[in-house]
Amino acid sequence: MNNWKSLYKILQNQISKLKWHKEFYKNPKQDFTRNRKLKLETIINLLLCMEAGSLKDELYKYFDLNLDNPTASALIQQRQKIKIAAFEWLLKKFTNKTRQNKKYKGYRLLAVDGSSVPISYDINDKETYIVQISNKQKEAKGYNAFHLSAVYDLLEHTYEDIIIQGEAKMNENGAFNDFVDKYNDEKAIFIADRGYESYNSFAHVIENKQKFLIRVKDIHSKTSLTRSLNLKNQPGEFDIIINRILTPKQTNEIKSQPEKYKFIPNNQRFDYLNKESPYYEIEFRIVRFKLSNGNYECIATNLSNEEFSIEEIKELYNKRWGIETSFRELKYAVAMNAFHSKRRDLIKQEILIKILFYNFSERVIQNIKPKQKKRKHKYQINFTRAFHLIRFVLNKIKSGIKPPNIESILEKEIEPVRPDRSSTRKVRHQTPVFFIYR
């Protein structure tokens, strides 16, 4: 079982190995060759400990108010020598080495979703600049943001893979397909919400011999993938198998058999059709069930009905909410909205290092089981407090201070679990924590 000491040792071992990977330096012959205070390992550990304070305050805190501590300018210059690939490598290595191999019926449960990450304003950055027109304002209001597409292990509570795109150029379906194509691990179920429904995504999962479970728009929606499947006459709840031959052809035979063929227009991307192979046969399930509020949900999946019932499909989709709560913790508890640079490459560094810190913290928290006394509610670890305390301990360790029993401290930081609470979701653009207010 992983514990604080072993997790910390694995993390530091991987950080120390970075210096031997010269391919991660922008100038391998010169970068990090001199003996400086800001060594590569020091920079990584400093970034791990950073919260939402100003860069100068974070430096004073990390170097214990030393008057001879490095300047903010020196840190920025040193960070510019490190490629983004170094942080991607570190995240992947630590996550894989500490995985606990939790599964559901032999499958890993991997949720795929995206979230906007607000960054500093720059109207000339065409990759990230978005114009948002408000109903209350006649003039267009613009902002800059990265779009974070992620694969999240719902049982391990850790991020497995990340793609960072400019909000203006982002492609969630393309990111989903990239995740699936890169995945070469044990069998998994890729779970996603509406917005990822497409025959192309279904085919990518099938071709990679994996499973998908994707929510699609209801059968009465005019833009639903299910519209052409003639399901409107089906009863309220159903579980049916869909067999179609996808093709870009429009012959009379194809037009006369809509229950057999599905036309794919040229402006709709499908990666497995070409002149040599103009037909692609696909099979999947459409499961429709009723919610407690009277509405219906539709799920498309290639999980067999012998292995997974409707109730299990509902349970699996309900687990997808874990990635939504993780985004909230990542942005606010881990302070992803508070970056320490305006440079886009350095912002990406901080995104990846904060995800690494999130994974490290989740590994620590998972091994702590709060004592369940006779109380009204079940209790769990308070994640916001846990993240803060883990950062505090990481800061003390580098000063040579013997760390306390972190597990015993976190056991006291608990909060009640209230699973039935709900509130109206407020969908609006969030702004970054600007430098002037830190």
Image (cartoon, rainbow, N blue to C red):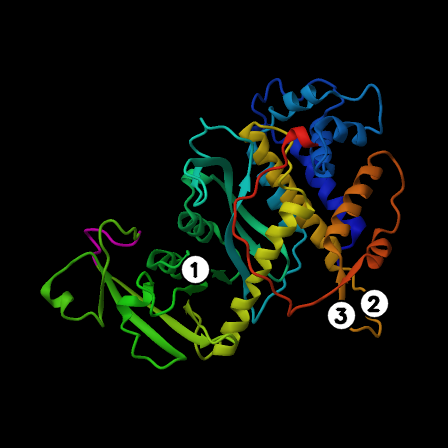
> Local crowd at mark 2 within 10 Å, few (<14), some, or many (≥20)?
few
The answer to which image quadrant residue 434 occupies is top right
The vertical placement of 368 against 333, above or below, is: below
The vertical placement of 67 against 414, above or below, is: above
> Local crowd at mark 3 within 10 Å, few (<14), some, or many (≥20)?
some
> Local crowd at mark 1 within 10 Å, few (<14), some, or many (≥20)?
some
Please state which of residues 126 and 130 is positioned toward the viewer in this rendering. Answer: 130
Q: Nearer the viewer, mark 2 or mark 3?
A: 3
At horizontal 49% and vertical 36% (from top left) the residue drawn is 143
Q: What residue type is disc 1 on?
A: Arg
**In this figure, which residue is indicated by the disc labeled 3?**
378
Q: Nearer the viewer, mark 1 or mark 2?
A: 1
Q: Secondary structure at mark 3?
A: loop
Tell me where residue 105 appears, x and y as whole percent.
56, 72
Tell me where residue 199 appears, x and y as whole percent.
33, 59
**In this figure, which residue is indicated by the disc labeled 2?**
371
Q: Secondary structure at mark 1?
A: loop
Image quarter where the C terminus lies is: top right
Marks 3/1: CA distance? 32 Å
Marks 1/2: CA distance? 38 Å
**In this figure, which residue is indicated by the disc labeled 1?**
194
Tell me where residue 378 appears, x and y as whole percent.
76, 70
Say whether residue 163 is visible: yes
Please state which of residues 6 and 214 is positioned toward the viewer in this rendering. Answer: 214
The answer to which image quadrant residue 106 occupies is bottom right
Tell me where residue 249 appears, x and y as whole percent.
16, 58
